[in-house]
Amino acid sequence: QVQLVESGGELVQAGGSLRLFCAASVRTFSSYAMGWFRQAPGKSREFVACISRSGLRTNYADSVKGRFTISRDNAKNTVYLQMNSLKPEDTAVYYCAARSSVVTSFIPVEYDYWGQGTQVTVSS
């Protein structure tokens, strides 16, 4: 069983930056590919970024490419999402997810565990 707890979300002005954290309670964190997703009111959950178990491979949604960076520290059981140049359309609840696979994925249903989410609000 994997427990994921996100933090770091808050209200920020457009153009600002935030760093999200996702702490995992699991002994074998390095066995999981990780992803960040987001869900805005009235919209379906969408892929943001994912990272391989080693951290060497990452993928991003086109909407965040060049502005967001996903990373992980397997010694600390933590995955991060650095968000720069934030836009009002980035406003959403951000979720981290874990997948027991060597392959990363941008499909929500392919992830096994989810956190409770953290709210990011970007004001214009």
Image (spheres, helix red, strand yellow):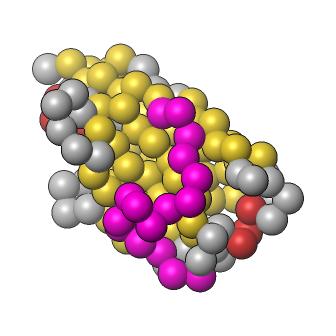
The reply to whether the magenta stretch includes residue 112 is yes
Q: Where the C terminus falls, by quadrant?
A: top left
Give the quadrant of residue 17.
top left
Residue 24 location, x and y as percent?
A: 71, 48
Q: Residue at x 74, y 62 (%)?
A: 29
Query: Is 74 placed above or below 36 here?
Result: below
Comparing 22 with 68, the one in front is 22
58 on left or right of 61: right
Query: Is 106 placed above or below 14 here?
Result: below
Q: Can residue 66 be seen in the rendering of this structure?
A: no
Give the quadrant of residue 83.
top left
Give the overall secondary structure of the magenta segment: loop
Residue 118 location, x and y as percent?
A: 47, 29
Q: Residue at x 36, y 32 (%)?
A: 93
Q: Residue at x 48, y 33 (%)?
A: 117
The reply to whether the magenta stretch includes residue 69 is no
Q: Which residues are magenta?
A: 102-117
